[in-house]
Every structure is written in C-alpha cells, then in structure tokens.
C-alpha cells in the first residue's frame, strides 16, 4: 500500500487557507471590476513555441514540459540520445505549462485582436508553474494575479493602478504601506546624464540591488560593469538626494536637462500626479523613488512597487508600462501597462499582522443539534428555514451524542449551535447557543433566523 | 514572426464567457457553502505513483505526463529506447497532471486525516487534463466541480445532495429537469434475483446503455456477456415496469424478496425519501430510475444523475455513494458520497435556453464621457464618487471624440453613459444616458450615484 505524497514544491490548500485566499482574491476581483477590468482565463498548457525564448535561457530551463501523448518516442533515434536532452526535447514534448500570465495574455491579444474592444482591460488569476528549486516561500506552482490595460498610452491608467492598490489595501485593512513609483525613462536619462548613454540596462540591474546591498557595493558592481569613476561620482548626488516629491522633481529637471528622454519621464510622472490630484487624491502615499528600477527589461514608462511597512515580507505588488507587449507574436505597437498582486505574500502579510477576519470565513454559521430521534426529525424540518434565510446551516448527519455534535461544531469553528430538545419541540422554538460567548437563549424559529441572518 | 496558436483541445475564456462561467460557479459555491461544504484546492501536478492505476489502462494512457526537469535523459540507456515508450516513461517522467478531482481528494484525506474534522464536507472546483482525442464538447482541459462528504454513512447526505441540486438549478433559472436516483445495491439484488448473482458489473454496463441503444440491443449485449435467456426474461418485467415511486418500491420489495442486499438498497432509498419529506420537500422532482446504473464501479449505494429536459445536452450532474474512497492509499473504511456539476454542459444548457442574465455580468455599468479637456478633468473628479458608491465606472482614458467614447461603451456593453459637458460642469450635475432605452436625464451627482447604485 503506497503512502501518498505531493510533488516537491507543490501544496494543498485546506479549508481555512482557501477561505482566506478567497477573501483576498474577492477583494482584488471586486476592485478590478470596479475599475472596468474584465476577467479572462487561458489554458494551463501552451505550445512550447509560444513559451520558449520569452523568459531568457534560465526561464526556458524552468519551463515544465509535457510529454507528447501516445508513443512519445516515435521520432527519437538512438543518435538523438547521444546528442543529449536538448536534441531529444523537441521530439518528445510540444507543450509546456504556463510560466507566467503575461505571455499567454500577449498570445490571447494577438489571436483575438479583431474581436477585442481597445483599450482592453483584463485581469487574470491563475496558477503558473516553474521548475525552480523549492525553498521557503518559493513554490513550483503558485498563483499570479495580473491586471493589464493594452491599447492606450493614457496616464490615467497609471493613476488608476495606484487607486486600485489603495482600494485593495484599504479593504484588506492594510494601512501602513508605500507605493514606490518611478519611470524607466528617468533611468535612461540618468544614464545619459552621468555620461553612460545606453547603459541603463546594467545601471538598472545594479541600482535594483541598492536596497539589498547598499551604495558601496553598487558602486563596485557598476565599476565591474564598466562604469567610469566619473560617471559613478556623477550618480552620487542622486543616490544621496533627500527631498520631498516636489523637490525631487525639481532636482531631476535640472539633473536631466540635457536628456530629452529623461525629461519626458519626469513629465509623465508629473502628469500622473496631476491626474491623481484631479481625482481628489492626496499624494501622501506616493513614494517617488528615483532609484527604483525593477528587473524586467520590457518596461518603458512608469514602474511601481509596493511594500507593506513593518513586516519582513518583500514587495506585494508591482508593475509598469511597456511599449511592445505583442511584437514577438507579430503584432507591433500594442502598448499598455500592467501590475500584479503577490497573493502568497499578501497572505503572509495579513497573517503576520493578524488582519484576517476573525469570523469563520465562508464557513457554517449554525449547527442544529439534537438528543434523540425526535429531535433529529425536528432539526431536519428546520434546516430549510434557516438555509432559505441565507444562513449556512448543517445538521450532524449521524445520530450521535450531543457532546459529539458540540465537539464537531467547535472543531469546525461553527459559532452557533441550535438545540432541538423536547421543550423546543413542544413550543416550536429553538435554543441558540453562542459558542464563543457561551450565551444561550430560546427563540421562535423566525426570530432565530432573523437574528442569525444579520450576524 | 510566429503566428501563435493554442494546443489542440484547449481554449481561452474571454470576458463574456468568464463572466457567465463565474455566474454559474458562484451559484454553485454559495449552495455548497450553505450546506456546510468547504473549499479545498490541490496542485495541478501529482506524482504519477498517485495517479497511475486509478483510472484503468485507458485512463493511464490519457494521463498527461510531465517531463522531469533538468537532464531528463540521465537514466535512459539506448537499450531502453529499444524497449519502447513504456520502458522509458518511468525514467523521464515522475509527475502527471490531475485527471480528476476524486483521486487528489482521496490523497488529501489520507495525508491530512489527523487534522480533518469528520464528517468532512469538501468542494473543489479546478481544471483537469485528459489526453483524449478532442472533439465537439470534449476538451483536453476542462473544469470539474465536485462536492463530497466522507466519514459518514448517514443518508441525510443523499437527501442534501438532492436539495443542493434543486437549489443550484432554482438559482440558475432551470425549472424543467429530472433528478434520477437509484441504488447500486438494488442492481446487485437484481443480478441475484434474475439468477446471475455477482454479475451486476456486466449487468450495469449493459443497462447503462438502455437509454442510448434500447432494450433489444441491451438483450443482445447481455447474451454476449453470458447472461442466460431465462435471466434476460426474468429482467424484462423490470425494464417494462411503469409505476409511480411508491409502486416501484412495492414491486421491488417483491422482486428482490430473496436478496438481502437488494432489499437493503430499497430500504436506503425509502429512507432518503423519508428524510426529504421530513425536510418539508415533496418528491415530485425525484425520478426513481431502477435501470440507472452509471459507469463507475466504485459506487456502492445511492447513485444520481440529472438531466435538463428539452435540451440536447447529456447529464449535467451526477454522483453516488462509495464505501472505500481511500483504501488504495492505505486508509480503509472511509465511506462517503460525492457528486459533481458539469460546468461546460451547464453553460451550454443555460445558453441554449437563454437563461444567462441579460445584464453585462460583472461588467462596467457607467462610462464617463466628455467633449474636451475641461470635461475630461471634470469626469476625473467624479470617478471616485461613483466608485465609492460601488458602481463599476470607467473613463475613456485617451482624450477622444465623444462618438468614439460612445462606440466604446456600446462595444463593451456598458449600459449607462455619463456626459460631462459645459452645462453639467457649470451646474455641478451629470447627464446620464441609458444606452438600451435611449433615455437621457440630468441629475445631481449624488442623485446619479444613488440611481445607478440601485439598478
């Protein structure tokens, strides 16, 4: 008899975890919908031709490939075997598991471009798979939760992303957080301004580590990447700049005065701030972080990153604007902006801060209990009444001792127990016991239903 | 430049399909929760040792296998290649994609048996994958939607499954359907009673086809399967029996009088009917179908099947009781009952009957439009007000001609357009046009929000 186990890096979600995840995702979905985003889903399996080459060499290695069905060896020769896995792979696997939601979305946009209404706002919440080495907090299957709008360059989108993040965090009870924002064009401008034109790529990679390794080590890395000492010195005032939002904008206008791209980046950010003001938002929560780079090279405009303060968990949301989502699939010129929530991390944050609702999420509210056959029968007759009032109600299905029924309620975190004893049957009432407070009272059935409906 | 495509047998779900699917699934989830079922999720990937051998030889062939990551060929010798795919498979693939939700659930119960509260009621809504030949209505990736309760033999569960089906169908607007019910023990009894004891397996397989191929062909098949002519003649009165529920019960009590198992089956069904009566339900919708067999051999008690009348679509729900869900994973004696909804088929049924809500499900309700920069700015200032009232609201993000904005609203099936012109700006009002009726009126902002909130 085999002892079952899970593949490494994967996990089950039990009832409590699921209810909490659902709580998070419902808040996110409601917010996306409030802002006009529509949900789509794509298949778990994509053709390897769709996936390969989109995530760099390392990404290609981390794709889970699906063995062709039937006789998967039919095209494999013994000479292929000698050439190794890379020669055999294309002959035995045509499909792979989704690695992120961005590439499938790009494919979807291209395949449906004639039917879609642009600007097209979509959200997508599905698992992705990566053959990464599993470690704490890193799984081989995990959910991504993305929203993108494509087919517009309007900076209203940037402003609305900030509002959506605020909306979600507000509803989840998160108060102390910062939304870091920057613009990739500013980084390009900085490279120009310090005398390293075109080297914003390595500049970003190095700067991205500023928080983690500090300015000294970043200087070393820049030096190794061929940045001159003068360039690095030119960069220093920016790294040490301490100013408020307006002060930073002013500084940059001067610092980037010879970089058209850089000034465009500043201008775009200013417009985002202006739109937010027109929308009646104050900017206290916006942290203009000139050094924010984010790793992904396809960003071309605004970039975001959100961190919750006071917890030891990395960024829980991020995103940015890109110029060319679908070019690789033959449809150039589709620009847009996207962002995502890290559901696993949000879960950990809410857990650490004790922000999950105390109530038994989505769980049963009332267990009907009884002492004997007569009470069982009475309880059966009441079930429909409570359920019709929308109250999640159960009966302990096997006729058992009432002690066992109460234990069941406690274990399942059911807050209220309805007792169907002889007195209750005779008077057509029910005694409701609140298992949290211990309080117990007798009610008419309608009273009890009304009471529990509103709790 | 590659032209992207989908793997055969898979599909994308666009915004309209997703909203409709969500509508169906929300109704189902609400119902499951109302009856005390809790959601779990299991990983898409399972160890092949968990999956293999659970679905018969054909099922094993239809499992999608995942190529081991890294150098998947490292254990493959050239002699393996000569032995063929079945010799190579165990060396190159350890994991497979979930084929159904039942086996992962059984694995989950076994792995978590010490933490779970029994009777454990769970529901699970996730995609499954089968390397079947794709054809109309048959996909390689599709959702299953299962509910099971394990750890009890109480027939309250059977009754509640019937109520859940009624609840879901009621909320979806489905009125004309029949819930077929039978008991596997009755079929065992019938085999005994006709003189073919122990042959209920082939009897079920043949009888299962009664609807499709008719009694004549079923007789031929029974004959081929070694049933004697006398046995087949003994079966005939049952096949031709026309009686109401009570009449069928009466007939069977006599027909099965020498089969203890058969009589037990009848008794169980009677108890289910009695519980339904105690719950205040009439039995008009219950179709006791003595010939209902269902293919799955692991059922041991009640079996269900639900068909919507007046559509050309097969059963949309079904299930049954089993004695030994987890035995294969080393935990004997876990009995329970499960059923599932066929989401794709329910979708087709609602579509065919025109039962999807007319409204733009989960979609934007209000688009704010404007003629110029001033109107754009005014519209921006109103967005938050409408959204705070819970109204799904958008602004066309690029400053465009109002005609284009209206076209966008029409294409996206947005019912209401808010017009922000000079008059509105001066008077602090908004004109709301109902795009379905053509009606247009001017309101204060609060009036407009109140109006749309309640629509």
Image (spheres, coloured by chain):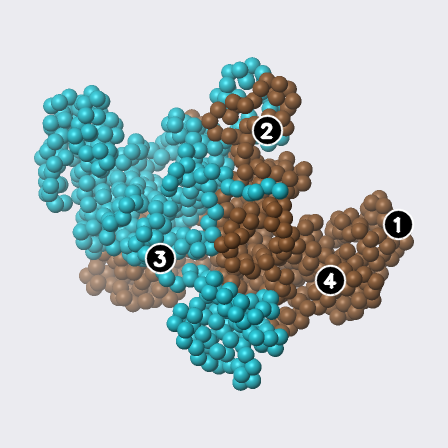
Chain colours: A brown, B cyan
Tell whether label 1 touches label 3 (CB within 8 Å). Answer: no
Coordinates of residue B41 in the picture (x, y in percent): 46, 44
Identify the residue at horizontal 60%, vertical 75% (top origin): B372
Coordinates of residue B51 in the picture (x, y in percent): 44, 31
Mark 1 surroundings within 10 Å by alpha-carbon count, few (fewer than 14), some (14 through 19), many (20 or more): some
Tell whether label 2 touches label 4 (CB within 8 Å). Answer: no
Q: Which one is in front in this view, the residue at disc 1 or the one at disc 4?
A: 4
Identify the residue at horizontal 18%, vertical 38% (top origin): B290
Identify the residue at horizontal 82%, vertical 65% (top origin): A257
Mark 3 surroundings within 10 Å by alpha-carbon count, few (fewer than 14), some (14 through 19), many (20 or more): some
Spatial separation of the CA atoms under disc 3 and disc 2: 45 Å
Mark 4 or mark 2, which has the lower sequence index? Answer: 2
Tell whether label 2 touches label 3 (CB within 8 Å). Answer: no
Circle 3 sits on which residue?
A: B356
What label does residue A265 carry, if any? 4
Spatial separation of the CA atoms under disc 3 and disc 1: 65 Å
Spatial separation of the CA atoms under disc 1 and disc 4: 25 Å
Q: Is mark 2 on a helix, strand or loop?
A: helix
Circle 1 sits on which residue?
A: A228
Mark 1 or mark 4, which has the lower sequence index? Answer: 1
Coordinates of residue B160 in the picture (x, y in percent): 28, 49
- Is residue A363 in view from this perspective? no
Circle 2 sits on which residue?
A: A89
Mark 1 or mark 2, which has the lower sequence index? Answer: 2
Spatial separation of the CA atoms under disc 4 and disc 3: 46 Å
Q: Quadrant of the N terminus of chain A?
A: top left
Foreground pick, A106 / B68:
A106
């Amino acid at each position: 008899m085999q002892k079952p186990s899970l593949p490494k890096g994967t996990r089950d979600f039990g009832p409590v975890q699921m209810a909490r995840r659902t709580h998070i995702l419902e808040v996110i979905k409601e917010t996306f919908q409030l802002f006009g985003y529509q949900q789509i889903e794509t298949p778990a399996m994509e053709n390897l031709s769709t996936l390969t080459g989109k995530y760099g060499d390392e990404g290609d290695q981390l794709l889970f490939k699906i063995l062709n069905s039937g006789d998967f060896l039919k095209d494999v020769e013994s000479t292929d075997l000698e050439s190794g896995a890379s020669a055999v792979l294309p002959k035995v696997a045509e499909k792979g598991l989704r690695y992120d939601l961005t590439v499938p979305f790009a494919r979807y946009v291209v395949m449906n471009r004639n039917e879609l209404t642009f600007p097209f706002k979509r959200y997508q919440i599905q698992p992705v798979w990566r053959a990464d080495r599993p470690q704490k907090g890193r799984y081989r299957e995990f959910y991504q939760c993305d929203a993108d709008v494509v087919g517009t360059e309007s900076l209203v989108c940037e402003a609305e992303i900030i509002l959506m993040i605020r909306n979600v965090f507000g509803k989840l009870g998160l108060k102390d957080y910062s939304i870091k924002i920057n613009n990739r064009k500013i980084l390009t401008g900085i490279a120009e301004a310090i005398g390293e034109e075109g080297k914003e790529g390595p500049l970003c990679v190095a700067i991205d580590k500023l928080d983690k390794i500090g300015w000294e080590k970043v200087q070393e890395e820049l030096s190794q990447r061929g940045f001159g000492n003068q360039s690095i010195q030119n960069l220093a005032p920016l790294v040490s700049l301490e100013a408020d939002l307006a002060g930073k904008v002013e500084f940059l206008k001067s610092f980037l005065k010879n970089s058209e791209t850089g000034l465009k980046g500043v201008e775009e950010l200013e417009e985002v701030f202006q739109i937010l003001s027109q929308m009646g938002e104050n900017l206290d929560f916006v942290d203009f972080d000139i050094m924010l780079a984010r790793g992904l090279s396809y960003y071309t405009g605004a970039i975001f990153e959100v961190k919750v303060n006071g917890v030891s968990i990395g960024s829980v949301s991020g995103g940015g604007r890109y110029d060319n989502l679908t070019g690789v699939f033959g449809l150039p010129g589709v620009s847009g902006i996207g962002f995502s929530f890290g559901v696993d991390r949000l879960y950990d944050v809410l857990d650490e801060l004790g922000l999950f609702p105390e109530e038994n999420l989505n769980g049963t509210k009332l267990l009907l209990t009884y002492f004997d056959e007569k009470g069982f029968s009475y309880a059966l007759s009441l079930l429909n009444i409570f359920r019709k009032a929308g109250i999640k109600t159960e009966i302990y299905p096997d006729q058992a001792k009432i002690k066992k029924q109460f234990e069941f309620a406690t274990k399942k975190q059911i807050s209220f127990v309805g007792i169907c004893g002889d007195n209750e049957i005779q008077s057509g009432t029910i005694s409701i016991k609140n298992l949290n407070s211990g309080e117990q009272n007798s009610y008419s059935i309608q009273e009890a239903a009304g009471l529990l409906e509103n709790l």
